[in-house]
Image (cartoon, rainbow, N blue to C red):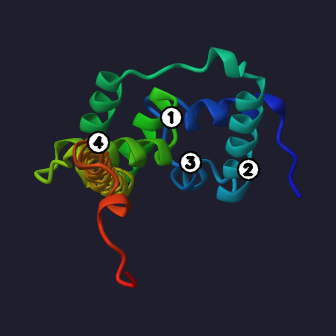
Amino acid sequence: MTRYSAAVKERMLRRLIGPSAISATALGRETGIGQTILSRWLRDATTVDRMARDPKKKKQWTGAEKLRVVIAARGLSDAELGALLRHEGIFETDLVAWRGVAEAALSDTVRRPGDSDAARRIQALERELQRKDAALAETAALIVLKKKAQAIWGDADDTMPSPSE
C-alpha cells in the first residue's frame, strides 16, 4: 500500500474541488493514483469540512437563488453538474427537491384551496353543521308555536273531553 504525503493529498483535493474540478476517475487516470483513494480523500475532506461548519451559519437560500441554480443546472453534463454543485455548495438532493418545487409551482394544474383532503373534510363538516343548525332552528320554532298556541287556546287537556267520558 502506497502512502501519499499530505502535500500530494492536498494538491489532489484542490483538483477535485472547486469550479475547475475534474472527476476522481479522470484525475486517477492522469496521476496514477487510484480512483477509490481519491474518492475517499474527497469524501473525508467534505465530511470534515461539513462537520467543521457552524450549522447556524448555513446559507439561507431565497426562492430566486434556488431558481437560478435550477436553471443553471439544466442540460449540464454530469461533470459540469458536479462542478456547479460544488461551486454553489449544495447537494444533488437539494437541487432535485428545488427542481420539483419549481415544476410544481409552474405546472398547469393549479391547485385550488379546496383540493386538499383537509379542506374537503372541513367543507363536509361545515355542511353538516349548517344542516344541524337548520334542524335546531326548526325545532325551536315549533316549540315557540306550541307555547303560543297553548297561550291562545289554553291547555288542550282542559277543554277536550277525554274519550272515556
Mark 2, residue position: 40
Secondary structure found at label 2: helix
Q: In this view, does 23 lie to the left or right of 74?
A: right
Mark toward the start of the polypeptide (2 vs 1)? 2
Quarter assignment of residue 109: bottom left
Mark toward the start of the polypeptide (3 vs 2)? 3
Q: Is residue 54 left or right of residue 117?
A: right
Mark 1, residue position: 90
Res 87 seen here: yes
> How far, Cα to Cα, is label 4 from label 1?
81 Å
Q: Is 38 or 42 nearer to us in this picture?
A: 42
Mark toward the start of the polypeptide (3 vs 1)? 3
Q: Which mark is residue 132?
A: none
Residue at the image position 39 percent from the left and 53 percent from the top: 118
- The amino acid beneath tag 1 is Ile
- The amino acid beneath tag 3 is Leu
The count of marks equals 4
Q: At which x and y percent is residue 91?
A: 52, 41
> How far, Cα to Cα, is label 3 from label 2?
13 Å
Mark 4, residue position: 151
Which residue is outermost to the top?
57
Q: In this view, does 81 lie to the left or right of 14?
A: left
Residue at the image position 65 percent from the left and 34 percent from the top: 13
Quarter assignment of residue 132: bottom left
Which residue is outermost to the front?
165
Label 1, residues with CA under 10 Å away: few <14, some 14-19, many ≥20: some
> How far, Cα to Cα, is label 4 from label 2?
95 Å
Circles 2 and 1: CB distance less than 8 Å? no
Mark 3, residue position: 27
Q: Is 26 or 158 nearer to us in this picture?
A: 158
Label 3, residues with CA under 10 Å away: few <14, some 14-19, many ≥20: some
